[in-house]
Amino acid sequence: MSPSSSPVPPPSRIPIESLLSGPSGSTSPKDLQETELSAEERALAQAHDAAAQAAVEQAQAEIEIDNGSDTTSDSASDAGYETDSMYSASTSISSSVRDFAFENGRRYHKFREGSYNFPNDPSEQDREDMKHAMMVNLLGGQLHFAPLGEHPGNVLDMGTGTGIWAIEMGDRYPSANILGVDLSPIQPNWVPPNVRFMVDDVESPWLKPPNYYDYIHSRHTVMAIRDWPLLMKRALEHLKPGGWMEMQEIHHHPYCHDGSMPPDHPVAQYWVLIHDALANLGVNFNATLLLENMMREAGFVNVSTRIFHVPIGTWPKNKVLKLVGLYWRTVLMDGLQPIALGPLTRGLKWSKEQVEVWLIEVRKAYMDAWVHSHMPLHIICGQKPDDGDGPPQATN
């Protein structure tokens, strides 16, 4: 059984073409009208659009299962999925923060070393960008759900990673000023003129003055933040009255609508161990489930949560969700070692060899096509009160 959420209006409808080509090369409905398409092409475009809209709706309810995929192993035969297999402190970016630490053959950030328990090497950056592709498809092309209007103003992206979300926001809102902050200097040099990046720790005192930002965004940061209440108070202090904070966080625990994953399944056990290891390192991996109440307690108003179910694997019948599931399972399988290595060797004192041997069984278990599992994505939005009588400022 999956977590539930209060009813919310569905997101606006965006054609599938914009999901596949991206902001810089997307095809708008107007473009389609101005282009001479054959009847077959128009029918295909309409089918893709309908599938994308159905995917958004199903992901917030219960995903329809493709019963034809229930085999002993998962090697999808649908057209377009032939490759699916199991082997598939504030500072500018100076030379000092571009140094990296190496541990167990993986590269980690050097600035505030040890604050983040996962690597930042090129393979991990590719995995982060695939997460973004998964999110774009799952959410119908939306980058945010907070009501920002046409000119968002000053935007902060906490834990920006490769910077791909900040870059797309910069393209979509040319008048906005986007700042992406991360512990690792792994962002590209060529970015839109309204986007810049800074190496910083968002859990340290912020440089910008109070009432500066119009919108603060975070995504996939639940495994990094140690003190969420303080972070939210600090965000509230630095938002302008009426500004919005939005968190897009996945609860990394597999759920099933049909009970097809038993508690002793290797994938379920994997995430239990990761949770225990991170708890020993001071990180609450279940914080996603607490963020809505934390936001209210910090003083935000108009707080709301909507939940999308992210399928693991190609078991959904809907083609868009099948692709989302392929992306997400690939992200999780490619991340087996980088997700486990730091927490288990640091938090549970396993050896690297113990981790590698154990992951063999987990890797095989991810291909169990009879398991129809998903992970809930929580999108939590909250607004700073507009009356100027907000709660006390965050302490440094």
Image: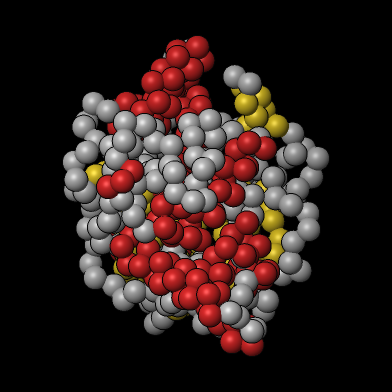
Where does residue 77 sit, x and y in percent of width and height? Answer: 44, 44
Which residue is more in the foreground, 341 or 372? Answer: 372
Residue at the spot x=81%, y=40% of the render? 95
- The quadrant in which residue 393 appears is bottom left
Which residue is more in the foreground, 195 or 227? Answer: 195
Q: Is residue 39 above or below residue 332?
A: below
Residue at the spot x=56%, y=69% of the render? 17
Residue extending farthest right: 95
Count of picture labels: 0
Q: Is residue 394 left or right of residue 26?
A: left
Where does residue 290 sit, x and y in percent of width and height? Answer: 30, 51
Q: Is residue 68 above or below residue 281?
A: below
Where does residue 185 sit, x and y in percent of width and height? Answer: 70, 45
Q: Is residue 317 left or right of residue 223?
A: left
Colour scheme used in the picture? secondary structure
- The quadrant in which residue 114 appears is top right
Q: Is residue 374 left or right of residue 106?
A: left
Residue at the spot x=31%, y=62% of the render? 58
- The quadrant in which residue 276 appears is top left
Residue at the spot x=67%, y=69% of the render? 25
Which residue is more in the foreground, 321 or 354? Answer: 321
Which residue is more in the foreground, 83 or 203? Answer: 83
**Any part of residue 375 in sight:** no
Q: Is residue 109 above or below residue 308?
A: above
Where does residue 194 sit, x and y in percent of width and height? Answer: 71, 70
**Any part of residue 198 in sight:** yes
